[in-house]
Amino acid sequence: MPILGAIVLLIQGCFAYHALKTGRPYWWLFVIMGFPVMGCVLYYFIEVFPTSRESRKAEKAVRAIARSFDPDKSLREHVANLEDCGSVDNRISLARSCMERRMYVEAISLYRSCLNGVHATDPDLRFGLASALLGAEQFRDAYDTAQALRQSHAAFRAPEVQLIAAKALDGGGQFDQALEEYRVLADTYAGEEGRWRYGALLVRMGRTSDAAEVFRRMLRNADRMPEHYREAQQEWLTRARGHMQA
């Protein structure tokens, strides 16, 4: 029993130290020390858990479950909003909802309907249109839209716009040009997608040794990064490992 008491006291001390270090209200100290087990449990679930990675995962799981019961709820809501008011904001919201459901042709129509008047050169709308065109495999139009955006708003989401342009070139069979775009993205794009697409295109072009070096670089880079980074980039890292093992 003395050992158990010492363990409980140590746990209380850790929670009390956390409360002081993170600037929580002082009354938490009385709760933690006055109620040895329940006080610590309450402190964890009220103060610590909501800001933890586990909480964010739980929230994502809840949203996924909700979508599984009614996957088109938000789409119906956006349609209803647009029927009530055909504003640009409502059309954009519906276009984004269409993109989430891979309804690219519908998204293209909505984005194009917004590109008039004061919104004719809006970079956010043109980015959405380029993304929708790419999703619909209208590669020539996607590339032209991305290029026009790069020329008129060079600083606007530059790596993402360049990725759209590169994927459009890739999808359209213009591999040499796509490779040059991917080569730049391998060093500038946040995350591992740019590097993976560079390596994947090298594989398709028969340059397997160069591709292997790109994939090794990806995996080395990931090993030096925090766990949450590896979790976020899991798709691309898994693909890289698959190429290395092939």
Image: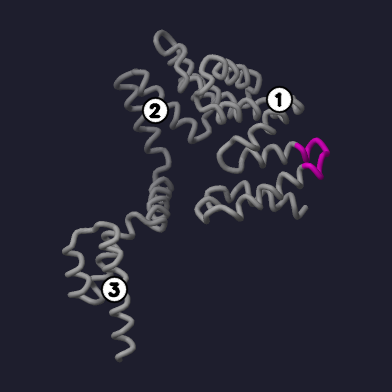
* Residue 38 drawn at (x, y percent): 24, 73
Do the numbered discs 1 and 2 sit on residues whose CB atoms are within 8 Å? no
SS at mark 3?
helix
Q: Of residues 67 and 165, which is closer to you in this image?
A: 165
SS at mark 1?
loop
* Labels 1, 3: front one: 3
Q: Quadrant of residue 130?
A: top right
* Residue 131 drawn at (x, y percent): 55, 27
N-terminal of the two: label 2 or label 3?
Answer: 3
Residue shown at 65% from the left, 23% from the top: 139
Amino acid type at circle 3 is: Gly
Amino acid type at circle 1 is: Gly
| Label 1 crowd bin: few (<14), some (14–19), many (20+), radius 10 Å | some
Amino acid type at circle 2 is: Ser
Residue 93 marker: 2
Up the image or down, 169 lies above or below 50; here it is: above
N-terminal of the two: label 1 or label 2?
Answer: 2
Q: What stretch is highlighted in magenta?
A: 202-210
Q: Main secondary structure of the magenta part?
A: helix
Up the image or down, 51 lies above or below 170; here it is: below
Q: How many marks?
A: 3
* Residue 132 drawn at (x, y percent): 54, 26
Residue 172 marker: 1
Residue shown at 39% from the left, 44% from the top: 70
| Colour convention of the picture | one colour
Cα distance in 3D space between marks 1 and 2: 29 Å
Residue 159 marker: none
Residue ID for mark 3: 13
Cα distance in 3D space between marks 2 and 3: 49 Å
* Residue 182 drawn at (x, y percent): 68, 32
